[in-house]
Image (cartoon, rainbow, N blue to C red):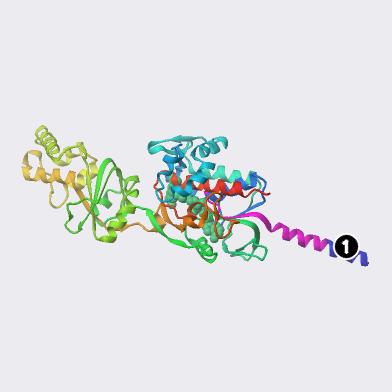
Amino acid sequence: METIHKLEYFVKLCYRVGMQNNRIFDLIVIGGGPSGMMCAGRAAELGSRVLLIEKNKDLGKKLSLTGGGRCNITNAEFDNRAFLANFPEAKEFLFSPFSKFSVKDTFDFFEKKGLPLVVEGRKRAFPKTQKASDVTDVMARYIKENNVEIKLGTKVVGLSKDKDGNFLVETKSGDSFIGQKAALASGIGGEGAQILEKLGHAVKEPNPNLVPLTTDAAWVHALSGISLSFMTIRFRQGDPSTCRGQAKTMLKKTGKILFTHFGVSGPLILNSSFEVKKLLEAGPVIASIDMFPDTEENELDRRVWRLFEQNKNKMLKNIIPGMMDKALAEQILNFPELRLAEKEANAVTKEERKTLVKRMKDLCFPITGTLGFEKALIADGGVALTEVNFSNMTSKFHPNLYLLGDVLDINRPSGGFSLQLCWTTGWVAGSDGVKK
Ligand SMILES: Cc1cc2nc3c(=O)[nH]c(=O)nc-3n(C[C@H](O)[C@H](O)[C@H](O)COP(=O)(O)OP(=O)(O)OC[C@H]3O[C@@H](n4cnc5c(N)ncnc54)[C@H](O)[C@@H]3O)c2cc1C
C-alpha cells in the first residue's frame, strides 16, 4: 500500500514539474502582428521553444488591412544606404539590423514561401496576388509549421522579472507564463507602452504622423471618392474665412489627391500631413490646389477662351468637363462668386472667365485639422532609440527583452517602409533568440 502511495506521489510530482516546464519558454512574443510573427517564426525555426500571445481572435488583423487590402509589403530599394535615407533620424541605428536582413531578404523570404512580390510606382512592392490576407497567411503558416505555441484572444497585462531574471508574463485571464526571453511586438501605444514604462523605458506618446487632413468646405466633401492626379497643392497660413493667405507658400507638393467625405487624403496628402500639423499649431492653414501646374495662368486663360470660341452656344456645364473631372467642374462652376454652370460661353464676361481660370489655378479651402491617431497609417512615438541595442534589437536595460516594429519610435514615410522595419527587426531578434 505504501509503495502505491509513493508511486502516486511520484507521478503527481512528475506531472506538476511537467506542467511547470510547459509554462517555461525560451521566448515569449507579445503581439501577433508582422514583427511578432516574424520574430516567433524565426526563433522557432532555429530551435527555440516559443510562445506567441495575441489579444485578438486572429493573427495579423491590421496586416490584413494594409495597403488598402493589397499590403505594400516593402519598398524595392535594394541599396541599404538609399533605403535608410528615408529614415533621417533613425538611419544610423538601422544600418546594423539591415545588414542582417535587408529588402532583398524580404523579397527572397516571401518568394521562397510561394508569395512572389511585384513592384509598382515609387518602388512600392506588393504581393503578386494583390491580397494582404495572403501575407498574413504566409506568416501564420511560418509560425505554425515551426511549432510556435499560439494563444489567441489573450491579452497581456503585465511583464515583470522573476528572481532568476526570467520574464513573467501575466494575462488578463489570470494565466501566466515564464520566458527566458520576451519580445514586445504589441504595436504602438496600449498596454505595451505601460509595460515598457514599468520596465524603466522612456516611451513617447503616439502622435499621428501620416494622416488624412480635414476641411469644412462642403464642396470638398461632395467630391468624396474622386481622385485627381498630377495636381500641385500648396499650404499657406492665412484667414480661412476668405481663403486669402499670406503670399508665402509654406509647403508645396505635386501628385495625386483623393477627396473624401471629411477632407483630403491619398499619398501626397499623407506625406504632407506631418508638416501641415506643424503649420496648424502655428495658426489657420489654407490649402490651394493648382489643377494645371504645368500651364501658366495666361496660357490657361487662352485655352479657356479658345474653348469658349469653339462652343459659343453651349452652357459651361457642358464644356468645362472637357478640361477636368465632371463632378469637380460642376462644383467649381457653382461657387458663389462664379455661378456659371447654366451660362452659355458667349455670355461669359472677360472678368468671369478670368475668375474661373484663377480658381482652376488656386482652388483653395481651409484645413481644419487631421483625422485622429486611430486613422493614422503611421504614428511616431514609442521607445527612444537610444535605449535599444540595434545589433540584436534588445532593450539596453533588459538584455533578454526584444523591442520590435511599431514599438520603436521611428519616423518614416509611407510606401512599405513600416512593414520592412517589422520584417527586419523581427528577423534579427528571432535569429538572436536561438537556443544555445
Ligand atoms: C490602415 C493602415 C494601412 C497600412 N498600410 C501599410 C502598408 O501598406 N505598408 C506598410 O509598410 N505599412 C502600412 N501600415 C503600417 C503597418 O501596418 C504597421 O507599421 C505594422 O502593422 C506594425 O506592425 P507591428 O507588428 O509592430 O504591430 P501591429 O501590426 O500593430 O501588431 C501588434 C499586435 O499586438 C497585439 N497586441 C497589442 N497589445 C497586446 C497585448 N497587451 N496582449 C496581446 N497582444 C497585444 C495587437 O492586437 C496586434 O495584433 C498601415 C497601417 C494602417 C493603420
Residue behind label 1 places its C-beta within 8 angstroms of ligand 1: no
Q: Which residue is mark 1?
A: 7
Residue 408 spot, x, y in % from top left: 48, 54
Q: Position of residue 252 (x, y in %)?
A: 26, 47
Q: Is residue 78 above or below residue 411?
A: above
- Identify the amino acid type marked 1: Leu
The structure residue drawn at horizontal position 16% and vertical position 37%, both measured from the top left corner, is 319
Instruction: Please report the bounds of the magenta region as a residue range.
Output: 11-34
Identify whether 242 is placed above or below 111.
Answer: below
In reply to whether residue 97 is colored magenta, the answer given is no
Judged from the image, the secondary structure of the residue bearing numbered disc 1 is: helix
In the displayed structure, does residue 260 sit left or right of residue 239? Answer: right
From this view, report whether residue 5 is shown above or below residue 383: below
Viewer-side residue, 353 vs 430 = 430
Q: Residue at x 40, y 54 (%)?
A: 376
From the top left corner, tell me how far across and down residue 4 is, in percent. 90, 64
Is-magenta flag for residue 20?
A: yes
